[in-house]
Image (cartoon, helix red, strand yellow):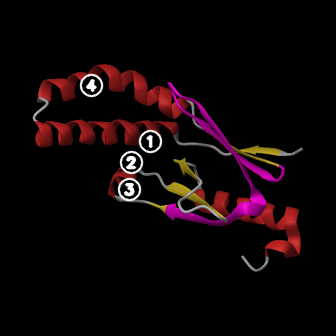
Amino acid sequence: MQEIEFEINRDAVEKYFRTGQSLTCLLLTFCFGIGIILALIHYYKFGRWFCPQQANNLRYRLEGSTLRADGGVFFLFRKSIPLERITDIALVQGPLLRYCGIWAMRIQTAGAAQCEATLWGVREPEKVRELILAQRQGVYGEKTNGV
């Protein structure tokens, strides 16, 4: 079985996670008056350990007819998505993702109300998207032409 692991821009993903958590802390401080000191402690202590762990634990790969996504820090996840269920791969880049120089790939599947998985910070996301769709076409052939 052929396995293709996708390269991730881990530094940019870590920056994205850290910036997002910092903004969340500041929002909590502003909305609920928790205190700026709590936000700073989170950012400089917990965030400096947690965000690199979160980024380093991400792993995305294509194994034959399955897309696999692994990640997590305290609660690990391993997701297996059969290629035949994939209906769309959306590339998303909001302001924070653009600031960090990365894209989010949202994997849509048949029968799911929301995206099945989000792949953060994959290098060359357009090529990866085309590779996944080509692999799906190669494995399932004419079966997926209407999708």
Q: Relative to 114, is 49 on the left or the right?
A: left
The mark nearer the N terminus, 4 or 2, is 4
Three-letter amino acid code of the residue under disc 1: Ala
Q: Quadrant of residue 18?
A: top left
Q: CA distance from mark 3 to mark 1?
A: 10 Å
Establish if 39 lies above or below 1: above
Which residue is pictured at 54% across the width and 51% down the height?
A: 118
Q: Residues within 10 Å of mark 3 (few under 14, many from 20)?
A: few
Q: Quadrant of residue 40?
A: top left
Three-letter amino acid code of the residue under disc 4: His
The mark nearer the N terminus, 1 or 4, is 1
* Cβ atoms at labels 4 and 3 below 8 Å apart: no
Residue 144: percent from left, percent from top = 79, 73
The mark nearer the N terminus, 3 or 1, is 1
Residue to which mark 2 is pinned:
100
Main SS type for the magenta part?
strand
* Cβ atoms at labels 2 and 1 below 8 Å apart: yes
Q: Is residue 75 magenta?
A: yes
Three-letter amino acid code of the residue under disc 3: Arg
Establish if 42 lies above or below 27: above
Q: CA distance from mark 1 to mark 4?
A: 20 Å
Q: Quadrant of residue 98?
A: bottom left
Q: Which mark is residue 42?
A: 4
Q: Which residues are magenta?
A: 64-91
Establish if 27 lies above or below 72: below
Q: CA distance from mark 4 to mark 3?
A: 24 Å
Which residue is pictured at 87% across the width and 70% down the height?
A: 141
* Cβ atoms at labels 3 and 1 below 8 Å apart: no
The mark nearer the N terminus, 4 or 3, is 4
Residue to which mark 3 is pinned:
98
Residue to which mark 1 is pinned:
12
Residue 39: percent from left, percent from top = 20, 29
